[in-house]
């Protein structure tokens, strides 16, 4: 074996040896700052989730016809009722349709408004930034009540429209709610995207302008690709919010008979717990949470495969 071969093998052996990790410094300081979050996370997230899972595994059992009720372990019997519940899965399909239509429109408007605010051509940016964001300051229940009155043919000031088009009918009430959600959350999503735009170095824009790109070209080829992580983030938030739709349908039940107690999954959970059947409601909640996790995770994996970081 030559000296060159020995040197090459020795170098390869040294390359395969992983460097030793340095011991973590300031462990006590790290624990001190993480502890408040850990305590709050355990008390207000982990424990409630665990309690809901435990409740979903129980069933109510009575001794005799009028005997006292006792909670006993029932295994997966509640989940068998969930998967056999047709109205619940119909409500899931309804909110998925809602999300497929409403989320792209909402995020498209949020992106458009963010690009307008970041454009040097727009005047009065402070006013428009506040005007776009103000609807998010209105609580969801208040916004639903306000729009419910605007949709109602007997109460709306726009009777020329509501008298001809029944926005609270069974065919249109879902999209009437979509308008409320869009009106409220466009400004919130716009702010996230706009903050991401502000983080882009100005040198990038200067280089694009030197190459002859106009404002539209810069927005399409530079700004949108660079804020794609923010768009992905807002999409995940929107997916979660879509499956948790509750305030708007709960309020709209007062305005439209088309909104039933099982109109959305969360409304089904709320109505079931009001019976009361807490164990079945807990099972509905667990299945809904798992569905939300699966959809959000699948969307994130899809965007990662497409190269969006």
Image: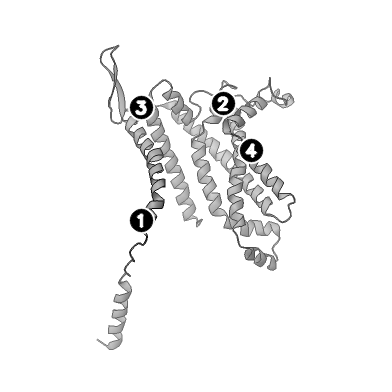
From the viewer's perspective, is 112 left or right of 60? right
Q: Residue at x 58, y 49 (%)?
A: 192
Q: Residue 279: which numbered mark, if any?
A: 3
Marked residue nearer the N-terminal end (2 or 1): 1
Colouring convention used in this rendered image of the protein: one colour
From the viewer's perspective, is 297 left or right of 214? left
Q: Which residue is mark 2?
A: 251
Q: CA distance from mark 2 to mark 4?
A: 18 Å
Is residue 110 visible in the rendered structure shown here? yes
Judged from the image, the secondary structure of the residue bearing numbered disc 1 is: helix
Is residue 182 visible in the rendered structure shown here? no
Q: CA distance from mark 4 to mark 3?
A: 37 Å
| Label 3: few (<14), some (14–19) or many (≥20) C-alpha neighbours in 10 Å | many
| Label 4: few (<14), some (14–19) or many (≥20) C-alpha neighbours in 10 Å | some
Q: Residue furthest bottom?
A: 3
Residue 121, quarter of picture: bottom right
Marked residue nearer the N-terminal end (2 or 4): 4
Q: Could you tell me if the residues under marks 1 and 4 are in contact, i.e. CB atoms within 8 Å?
A: no
**Above or below, 150 relative to 105:** above
| Label 2: few (<14), some (14–19) or many (≥20) C-alpha neighbours in 10 Å | some
Judged from the image, the secondary structure of the residue bearing numbered disc 3 is: helix
Q: Residue 135: which numbered mark, if any?
A: 4
Q: CA distance from mark 1 to mark 4?
A: 44 Å
* x and y, in percent, of residue 215 in the image: 70, 58
Residue 147, quarter of picture: top right
Q: Residue furthest top?
A: 66
**Above or below, 150 relative to 66:** below
Depth check, mark 2 against mark 4: the one in front is 4
């Amino acid at each position: 074996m030559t000296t060159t071969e020995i040197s090459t093998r020795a170098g390869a052996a040294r390359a395969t040896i992983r460097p030793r990790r340095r011991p973590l410094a300031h462990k006590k300081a790290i624990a001190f700052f993480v502890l408040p979050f850990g305590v709050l996370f355990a008390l207000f997230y982990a424990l409630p989730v665990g309690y809901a899972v435990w409740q979903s595994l129980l069933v109510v059992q009575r001794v005799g016809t009028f005997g006292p009720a006792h909670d006993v372990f029932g295994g997966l019997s509640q989940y068998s009722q969930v998967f056999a519940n047709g109205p619940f899965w119909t409500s899931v399909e309804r909110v998925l349709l809602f999300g497929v239509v409403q989320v792209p429109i909402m995020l498209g408007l949020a992106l458009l408004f963010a690009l307008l605010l970041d454009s040097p051509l727009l005047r009065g940016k402070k006013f428009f930034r506040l005007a776009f964001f103000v609807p998010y300051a209105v609580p969801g229940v208040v916004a639903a009540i306000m729009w419910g009155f605007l949709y109602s043919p007997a109460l709306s000031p726009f009777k020329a429209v509501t008298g001809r088009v029944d926005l609270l009918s069974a065919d249109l009430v879902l999209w009437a709610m979509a308008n409320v959600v869009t009106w409220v959350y466009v400004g919130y999503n716009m702010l996230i995207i706009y903050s991401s735009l502000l983080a882009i170095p100005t040198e990038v824009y200067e280089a694009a302008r030197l190459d002859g790109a106009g404002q539209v070209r810069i927005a399409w080829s530079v700004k949108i690709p660079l804020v794609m992580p923010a768009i992905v983030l807002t999409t995940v938030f929107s997916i979660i919010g879509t499956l948790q739709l509750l305030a708007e349908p709960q309020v709209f039940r007062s305005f439209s008979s088309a909104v039933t107690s099982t109109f959305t999954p969360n409304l089904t959970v709320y109505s079931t717990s009001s019976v009361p059947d807490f164990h079945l409601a807990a099972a509905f909640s667990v299945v809904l949470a798992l569905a939300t996790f699966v959809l959000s995770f699948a969307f994130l994996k899809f965007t990662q495969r497409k190269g969006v970081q």
